[in-house]
Image (cartoon, rainbow, N blue to C red):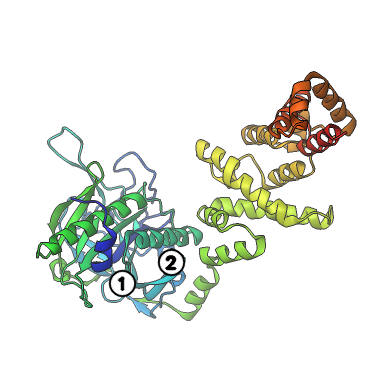
Amino acid sequence: MQSENTTEDLNTYRPIIGMEIHVQLKTKTKMFCSSPNNPDETKPNTNICEVCTSQPGTLPVINKEALRLGVMLGMALHCEIPEYSKFDRKHYFYPDLPKGYQITQLDQPMAKNGYIDIEVNGKIKRVRINRAHLEEDAGKNMHPEGLPYSLVDYNRAGTPLVEIVTEPDLESAEEAKAFLHQLRDIVRYIGAGSADMEKGTMRLEPNISVRKPGESTLPKYKVEVKNINSFKFAEQAINYEIARHIEELKEGKIPKQVTMGWNEKFNKTVEQRSKEEANDYRYFPEPDLPILHFSKEFLEGVRDSIPELPEAKRKRFSEEYALPIADVDALIDWKELNEFFEEVVSELQDWCENEDKTKDVKVLIKAAANWCLQDFAALLKTAHVDPLESKVTAQNLSQLVRLIDQGKISGSAAKQVLVEMFAKGGEPSRIVEDLGLAQVSDESAIADAIAKVIAANEKAVADFKAGQEKSFGFLVGMAMKELKGKGNPQVVNDLLRKKLAE
């Protein structure tokens, strides 16, 4: 089985992909009870109660915050929010579903007819959202290796979910990946959830089929791949299935309409069961919950609380800060880091406006972006720390950028200062003083060092004057060594060239 498609195949066979994505909402309690909603809980069957384990005589109560976050997510996806919405029972029997049914929404979801615009290979594509509805999560089946039985953890049972269902508008794994990245960013920006696929707070199920050459209608089959938990696996699973479908279609077969799972160990999909239809679930309205009526005041309040969304922020960063698109994308992809970066920018703008109006603030902003995305980001990832919770404040990082720009410390010294700031906090100027990292810009001190280097390296001087430019770099290095690495590189370069030209 080939895991990738040839250009010829993709030019003649057209993949058709729809997505079903489950996003856990970030609420204190579960969807219909007061049990804690904590995806980081490691002790099984701790966050449970009579309601989420379906003890006799218990009744569900709607989580108002989950409802608000769900509606906000629907609005952020450009969906229509109907005036009325209701919950339904979806029946199936599985060990991780204690009631024997799931409370979800069938024909009156909280949001419908939305879209997300994605960009792939420089082209904008609109992916339509069919619906977004609220429901509760199931528990988690555990299959300990080597044991003849399975276990069930109900900590996740009853967790509030939004299921987002797209139209079959995606045509490649690349488009699917771009869509998922965009959706994840939206969820995080509005504070609806962490959308962390590795922790299972965002799970996805692509529905895949392939049109044969000349076909214009949707194929009569589709294959669903269940519970994928990473962007990488999503891309691999979709590419694998597309290749498998094309191979079968070339042989004159029609792929079976089944539910598959992704085996990450063997990089292949495996058949799990035949795909259910809606009537298999015996849906009917949930009798223990009222029909929801969204008032105009409620909807206006939710809409007013939506923060700046990723696409709007991406456009603003490009226009206001004149950053390269790669930097903008990297910042937008890390919400907490771009919020920290904006605080740094604010500090730099205030300094330029009130302290030194001769400075080009955009040069400083670009330097700040580099420090945020490179050295600071590396320290954060290694320590698993949130940017806004680290000991490095936006004010102190802006001071570090200014110290470099003013020639008071070198780039290599600044790296040492940042490490010290990250470990212990503190103002960079004080750290520079304590560690003796101040850069030498005094021309007389640098001139003395250059004189010593020229006297001690006659051959390198002669080689440079004979046209060997690499000898200049050697002499610069020797001058920096004489200055113990603290010389201002620009001053060293300028004075050395001037001296050699005499």
Q: Report the front residue among 447 and 203.
A: 447
With 442 as the anchor, is 224 left or right in this view? left
From the top left corner, tell me how far across and down residue 162 is, in percent. 35, 63
Location of residue 335 with respect to 432 vertically, above or below: below
From the top left corner, tell me how far across and down residue 205 is, in percent. 27, 59
In three-dimensional space, the C-alpha distance between marks 1 and 2, rounded to whole angstroms, equals 14 Å
Q: Is residue 31 visible?
A: no
Q: Amino acid at mark 2?
A: Ile
Q: Which mark is residue 118?
A: 2
Location of residue 23 with respect to 415 vertically, above or below: below
With 306 as the anchor, is 258 left or right in this view? left
Q: Residue at x 47, y 66 (%)?
A: 122
Q: Report the front residue among 57 and 209.
A: 209
Q: Is residue 422 visible?
A: yes
Residue contact at pointers 1 and 2, CB within 8 angstroms: no
Location of residue 48 with respect to 381 vertically, above or below: below
- Disc 1 is placed on an element classified as loop
Q: Which mark is residue 167?
A: 1
